[in-house]
Image (cartoon, rainbow, N blue to C red):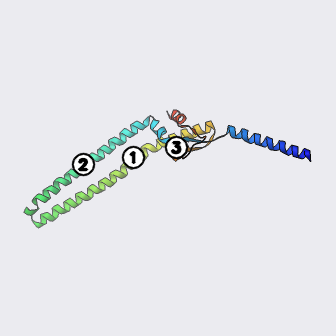
Amino acid sequence: MKLRVLFASLFAVMLMGLSTEGTAQTKIFAYADLDSVVRSIPEFETKMKELESYQNQLYASMQQQQQEFQTKYADFQQNQQNWLPEIIQQKAQELELLQRNLQEFQQNAQQNLQKRQFEAFTPLQDRARAALAEVAKAKGYQYVIPLDMLLYNDGADDITASVIEKVK
């Protein structure tokens, strides 16, 4: 009986030793700031400048259309007393058309800008995620949490710098 208890105790101590040893070698959690990683990719600045240029072109075109509408509206307000009812109706329809076109342009511009942003940054985000996966695998992490989702940290490692080095 004593031999059984001794054997069970030794077995339990060995299991605890193995589980402690295994835990010490296995890093489970890390975190990274993917936004910083994406911003560190050399092509990021080029993509930002391209998007800014595109946005400025859209804004200039929209400003031009708004100016045209404002000019025609001011003309309508000033001269409608002198015009025949048919001309007033024609000018009012023209103003409505200009306003609709301007609203459509604004909606399309917003959609096109979002599409361009997606097309510009998705490859950079994919590259950052791939580098993160490589670094995490190489360092033995099972899970990597985005920095903006990290509520508390007691033992997780920040691998952002390693991932940035990987994408450069």
- Number of the label disc, if any, that sits on residue 63: 2
Q: Residues within 10 Å of mark 2 (few under 14, many from 20)?
A: few
Towards the viewer: 52 or 34: 34
- For label 3, the SS is helix
Which residue is label 1 attached to? Answer: 116
Amino acid at pointer 1: Arg
**Residue at the image position 52 percent from the left and 43 percent from the top:** 147
Q: Residues within 10 Å of mark 3 (few under 14, many from 20)?
A: some
The number of numbered discs placed on residues in the rendered structure image is 3
- Number of the label disc, if any, that sits on residue 147: 3
**Residue at the image position 80 percent from the left and 41 percent from the top:** 14
Towards the viewer: 102 or 18: 18
Judge from the rendering whether residue 88 lies leftward or rightward of residue 131; answer left or right: left
Judge from the rendering whether residue 53 lies leftward or rightward of residue 136; answer left or right: left
For this orientation, the residue located farthest to the right is 1
Amino acid at pointer 3: Leu
Amino acid at pointer 2: Gln
